Amino acid sequence: MRTSALGALVGIVVFACPACGSDLPAAASGAAGRFYQALEVHDGAAACALLAPQTLQEVAESAQGECETAILDEGIPAGGEVIALRQYGTQAQARMSDDTAFLAEFDDGWRVVAAACVSQGQRPYQCKVKG
Amino acid sequence: MSRVRRFLRSNSLSLVFGGLFLGALVGQAFAGLAEFNNQQVADGLATVTFGRYVTSADFAVDVAENWQSEYLQFLLYIVLTVWLVQRGSPESKKLDEQGRESDEKQKLGPFAGPDSPRWARVGGWRTKIYSSSLGLVMGSVFLACWLVQSVAGWSAFNEQQLKQLQDPQSWVGYVGSADFWSRSLQNWQSEFLAVGSMAVLSIYLRERGSPESKPVGTSHASTSIEG
């Protein structure tokens, strides 16, 4: 029985914990914080550099212009502090004091997939910016 | 015959199944990686490396859900065949032998032989535990794998939720979710079907030389006779 209990513990550690996320949540949290900081100082280029490729393309296409200027006109609320970060695998959700953003992990770090998101209960968040 | 060849021959069943297991697991890892990355590309997200995938929740839940169901299958088969019988099946014991059977038949305590395991000879709690050790270990492995499935499945489910811009769930919420029970029950039903089929088909069908079959010429009515 002791062997079985040990096996269970090893199994959980080997299987489950790496599954809970490979990098420190701080990385995703930092990307979210930098994104909202860039918007706060009207640095569109820095904010766009933190967007996921598909989201960046969507912002530029919908505004029919450059992301750097379009992102500042999207009506993204000031994020404030990161109050909670939930990360599972390559995905994360950053709850800011005044907004909610979704992020994904890319080869060069975490990028914002969606921002200015409002909860719709059981349905997906409604986001002003998304890919 | 050399010692190595003798060892290989004496343990061929375990060795072949060990090899098949590892081969299939590696194959599953590569196929799962390709499927995961195809979905990532379709979603406009980054692909992951092989190392990252085999330590991910996605891979862990796919492995654990199959493991738990296999151990559950054998646990039930081992325990239920103590009391349940199937007339004509080599997988069943004789119809009048249902139950735990006598100490004499089970070679316990004073009826143990010189080569009997020590815990079968000594009596008391050790013999009691040893008498159920196969079921206890299979049951423990089943529960451990099911627990791992629940944790890894919860993480994989929440990764999917976040991809769809939805809130993640708590572990308790996940254990009561359709995803958890769908994964569990789809594996269980196939295991129960396979075991039930084996018990019934082996009444009428034969595989010459297999210990899982009755000898080819044995009557359909003969129970508990293995080839």
Image (spheres, coloured by chain):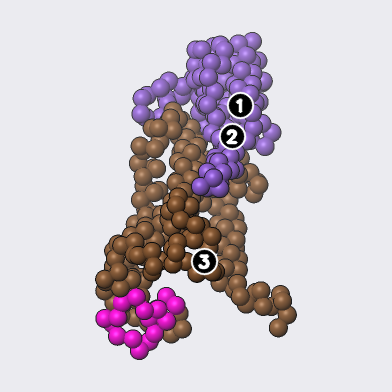
Chain colours: A purple, B brown
Whether the magenta-drawn stretch holds residue B52 is answered as no
Which residue shows up at 64% across the image and 18% down it? A34
Q: Which mark is residue B218?
A: none
How many marks can you see? 3
Nearest the viewer among B159 and B24 is B24
Q: Please give the range of residues in magenta.
A: B211-227
Neighbor class of circle 1 (other Cα within 10 Å; few <14, some 14-19, many 20+) is some
Mark 3 and mark 1: Cα distance apart in space? 55 Å
Question: Disc 2 marks which residue?
Answer: A21
Q: Is residue B200 visible?
A: no
Chain to which mark 2 belongs: A
Q: Which mark is residue A25?
A: 1
Estimate the x, y position of residue B173 in percent, counting from the top left: 38, 32
Which amino acid is tagged 3? Ser
Q: Residue at x 56, y 16 (%)?
A: A82
Subunit under mark 1? A
Do labels 1 and 2 touch, CB within 8 Å? Answer: yes
Q: Amino acid at mark 2?
A: Gly
Q: Magenta: predominant secondary structure element?
A: loop
- Where in the figure is residue B82, as x and y percent of width and height? 34, 62
The residue under the point 57% across, 68% down is: B14
**Chain ID, mark 3:** B
User: Which residue matches tag 3?
Assistant: B116
Against B95, residue B74 (above or below) is above
